[in-house]
Image (spheres, rainbow, N blue to C red):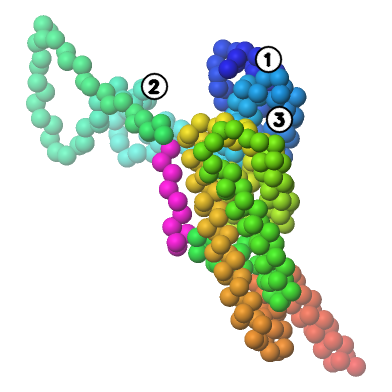
Amino acid sequence: MNKERLCKWLGLPTTDWPPDPWTLLGLPPGDHDAATIEERVHERMAKLRTYQLSYPEEATEGMNRLAEAFVALTESAKKKPPPETKAPAATKLANKDDTSVLDAPSQDWRDDPPPVRDEGPAAPEAIADDDAETEEVPVSQPFAPPVKHQRRLLSADQIRELAEESDEAISNLGTLDAVIARVELTRRLLYAWERVGRYLRANSKKTSPKESDLYAKRLQIIAEVMKTFPGFMGHAGRPGYRVVAQATLGLPLATVRAMNPDQREELLCDWQDGYEVLRAHRKFLRQRFKSMRHQTTVGLVMTAVRAVLNDYPRLTVACFAIALAATLVSAVLWALN
């Protein structure tokens, strides 16, 4: 692969490849605007597609890197913790109940010996010979995590919590028509998800025009359904997000099959997690449909009321406040009359 050619297309420096996600997208570090990230990824994807026939190897490498950057940045934006304010070191030392004057810590704490606790009378200080050689204190190196990411599939409890107990999974299911609509939406998504998995599990790196067209159609269905599907899967930090990112970016099948083994393994694990969650949610919807189908009219009305109370708590409180105010006004007017 000619990395100089690829860097020239994307306007990147040729000194280091692959670049970090911010440099790859031409964004300043720390920008967590998901809309800006997606817009920049689509812009660079469109630029690489113009070279896909002439230089397939370079275009495929660039598309894979852009997909990885899209997933990494959107997931980091989802998991980014709020900034914490830390007190300066001098302030912390000043607050301690110690009459002695303490020096500020050095730049590298590993070069300093550990502090001595005041646990009684000090022992007589040993006088070392001037000619004695000072031994260097070994400094522990920071822990380096393994390069390969250890990926584990979701457990049965995690799948049940996402597909049956999360707020996204159980919301907007107050009526029988709403349950039927969710069943149809889940069926469409699960059908396309299964067909996409067949292409992802294939060991062959060659693609035919027919396979590419069918794969693109399945991805289009996934991208369309995910616009209205609940957020318990397929969103940043949730199972199936890598597959949905592939569908959102519209990566061709040849680009996906050109991934290295580690990338393919992570994508397949993410597909498997999303598949199990979807199956569990379909089973949950079937059970809910059967229970609601045998309810009476009064039971269906009570179920719908409870669903509205759970799904729209602010609206419920506002309506209750308005009703209470109207009742008080009516009582005051009746008393005056």
Q: Amino acid at mark 2?
A: Gln
**Magenta part of the protein: which range?**
149-158
Does residue 225 belong to the magenta stretch?
no
Residue 302 against residue 233 in the figure, above or below: below
Q: Nearer the viewer, residue 42 or 246?
A: 246
Q: Nearer the viewer, residue 99 or 227?
A: 227
Residue 150's image quarter? Answer: top left
Q: Residues within 10 Å of mark 1 (few under 14, many from 20)?
A: few
Of mark 3 and mark 2, the one earlier in the sequence is 3
Q: Secondary structure at mark 3?
A: helix
Secondary structure of the magenta portion, mostly?
A: loop
The CA span between labels 1 and 2 is: 40 Å
Q: Position of residue 122 (x, y in %)?
A: 13, 31
Q: Amino acid at mark 3?
A: Met
The residue that mark 2 highlights is 107
Residue 153 against residue 54 in the figure, above or below: below
Q: Amino acid at mark 1?
A: Lys
Residue 138's image quarter? Answer: top left
Q: Is residue 55 visible to the viewer in this orientation of the structure?
A: yes
At horizontal 51% and vertical 31% (from top left) the residue drawn is 260
Do the CB atoms of the residues marked 1 and 3 lie less than 8 Å apart?
Answer: no
The CA span between labels 1 and 3 is: 14 Å
Q: Nearer the viewer, residue 26 or 127?
A: 26
Q: Position of residue 311 (x, y in %)?
A: 68, 69
Does residue 155 belong to the magenta stretch?
yes
Q: Residue furthest top?
A: 131
Of mark 1 and mark 3, the one earlier in the sequence is 1
The residue that mark 1 highlights is 8
At horizontal 56% and vertical 40% (from top left) the residue drawn is 76
Tag shown at residue 45: 3
Q: Residues within 10 Å of mark 3 (few under 14, many from 20)?
A: many
